[in-house]
Amino acid sequence: MYVKKIMLIMWHDRSRNPFRIIAKSHARHKKYGKQGMIDRVDKEYYALYPDFAHSKKVDHHKLYQEWIVQNEYDVLEAPHLQHNPLISIVTPVYNTNAVYLKKMFDSVLAQTYSNWELCIADDASTSQSTLSLIDAYEKAHANIKVTYRKTNGHISEASNTALTLATGEYVAFLDHDDTLSPNALYEMVKKLNTDPKLKLIYSDEDKIDEDDNRTNPHFKSGWNPDMFFSQNYICHLTFIKKDVVDAIGGLRKGYEGSQDYDLLLRALGYISYEEIDRVEKVLYHWRAIKGSTAYGTGEKAYAHMAGLRALQDYFTKKNPLVVVEDGLLPNTYKVNYPLANTLVSIIIPTRDGYEILSKCIKSIRTKTLYTNYEIIVIDNETTCQKTLNYFKKIKAYENVTILEYHQPFNYSVINNYAVSHAKGEVVVLMNNDVEVISPEWLGEMVQHASREEIGAVGAKLYYDNNTIQHAGVVLGIGGVAGHAHKYFEKSQHGYFSRLKIIQNYSAVTAACLAVRKSLYEEVGGLEEDGLKVAFNDVDFCLKLKEKGYRNLWTPYAELYHHESLSRGTNDTPQKQEREQREVAFMKNKWKSKLEEDALYNRNLTNKNENFGIDA
C-alpha cells in the first residue's frame, strides 16, 4: 500500500519527483522508524485525496455515536398533531428469545404517540418463555392484541393473521426482535400531517446487536424508483395505508425473506410516486444477530431469490419485455429494458489532443457491442498537424463526421451546435479524454435513455488509477454539486451498495451522458451564456428533472475518464474567476434546490463526496 500511495501521488501531480518523495519518506524512516515513513506518505496522499482520507481514517462507529448525541433528543410527550390516525403495528412471533421480545414490546409501549395498536400473531411457538411473555403483555395492555395460530405458517402467513386484528388507518411492520425509537410513530404521523395524501412513508434505520449497541445507520435516499428496482432500500420503518394492504391481499406465501419487498412492489399499483415520502430520522433499530438478514446478506440466501421472483412478477405485469436478473451483489438486482436498434449520435468536442482523442475513438470502435451509432467530432480550431492528419483518416469511416467550429471555446455552445447536426434519436455527450472499458456500455445507457420517464443517463467513470471519478452527482456538495463516491476503489461497493446498482440521481456528468435528442431540445440544451465550461451538465439535468424526468446512473457502463487532460485545471486567475461566476450563476438560478438533494439525505455530509455522516 505504501508503494501504491506513492504511485497515486505521482499520478495526481505529474510534476512531482518520485525519488524525492521516496527519499523524504526514507529519511523519516531512519529517524522515526517504519511508522514515521508511513506517516510521511500518508500526509502527502491524504492531502491530495481528502475524501478518501475521510472514508478510510474516520472511526465511523465513534462518529455515529457523536451524531446520535448531537441529533437525537428525548421526547417526553409528543406535541399536538391535528390528525392522529390509529396505527396498527403488525408483528409475527415465533419462538423469539424472551430478552429480545421484551425489548420489542417495551419499545412500542415507550412511544410518545399514543394512538396505536400492536397486533401480534404467534406462529405456533413451542417456547414457553415466548408464550408466557406474550400472554403477560396482552393482559397488561388493552392496545396489545394477540392471536395464536395452531400451525406454523412462516412469516407471510403469520403476518396476514396479525393483519386480521388490525383496524388502523396505516399499517407498520415490526419484526419480533427489533425495536422502535421512542418518537418513531410520532415522527411518521407528523409527516402524514404535513402531506395527508401520502400512502407510503419510510424512515432511516440502523442496526443493533445483542447488547443494543447501535451501528451502521442507513440514511436513505428519497423515493428513488430505479434504486428500489435494484434493491429494497426502503426496508424499515414503513407505514402503508391499510386499504392498500387490503386491496392487494396482504403478504404472499412463497416470498418469505423478501415478503416486504413483494408487498411494496404490488402496492405500487395502488400508489402514485407523489404519494410516497420519507422521514430523515433513524426511527427503527434492526437486530443484527446470527441468522438474521441484518447480520449479513449471506445469512438468508433464500431472501435474494424471493426478491428476484417478486421483481420478475412486478415487471411481468408492467412490461413483459423487461428481463430481471441477479445484480452484482447479493440482494441486488438488474432490470434490463427493451433495447431497440436506435441510431445514437456520439458527440466529441476537441481541439488538438491527438493522443487522447485517438484513444477515445479507437476504444469506441473496437470495444462497443452496440453498432448503430455515428460519431460526430467537433473540431474547435485544431492547429496540431498530427490531429489534422488523424481527422483526414477517420473522415473516411462511414459513421464518422468532422464538424468544424470556429469560435472561442464554449462547451455548451459547441455541444448544442453538434446536437443540431445529429441524426440520432439518442445523443451521447462525450469528452475526448474518455476511454471505453465495458463493451456493453452504449447498449446499457441507450436502453435507459429510451425509456419515456428517464432524462439523462450517466456512466461509471474511473480515473487512470481505477478509483471512482464519477458515480452520479449529489447537489449541495461544495456549494453546488459533487461526484458521489469520488476516489473510492473500483472494487468497493459504496454506501449500501450504491456503487453496484442502477439508481436515480439528481444529475450526472456530461463527460459521458446519454439523452434523447427530443428531450435535449425540449429543455433548450446546455446553458450557453452563464455556464460556458462548468456545471452546464448539472443545470441541464435539473432542467430535465423540473420537467418531470428522472435522471439515472448505471454501473454497467464503465469507462475511464482521464479528467482534465484535454482542458487542464483551473490554475489561472482567469479560470478561477470564470469558475466563481459559474458557481454564482448556479446558486442564483437554483437557490434552495442545491441545498437539499431529495436523492441524498440531510444527515450525510455536503463537505465531502464519500457519503460520510454529517456530524
Image (tube, helix red, strand yellow):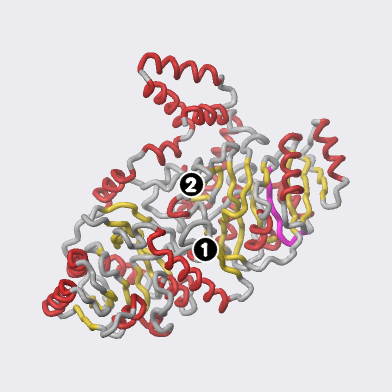
User: Counting residues from the N terminus, which is met first, the one under dot 1 or under dot 2?
Assistant: 1
What's the magenta region?
424-431
Q: Is residue 121 visible?
A: no
Q: Is residue 52 visible?
A: yes
Q: Nearer the viewer, residue 225 or 378?
A: 225
Magenta portion: prevailing SS class: strand
Q: Nearer the viewer, residue 531 or 190?
A: 190
Is 290 positioned to the left or the right of 343 in the image? left
Answer with the quarter of the image where residue 193 lies.
Answer: bottom left
Please name the amino acid that badge 1 sits on. Tyr
Residue corresponding to mark 1? 333
- Residue 198 percent across, percent down from the top left: 40, 73
Residue corresponding to mark 2? 492
- Residue 332 percent across, percent down from the top left: 49, 61
Disc 2, SS: loop
- Residue 268 percent across, percent down from the top left: 47, 75
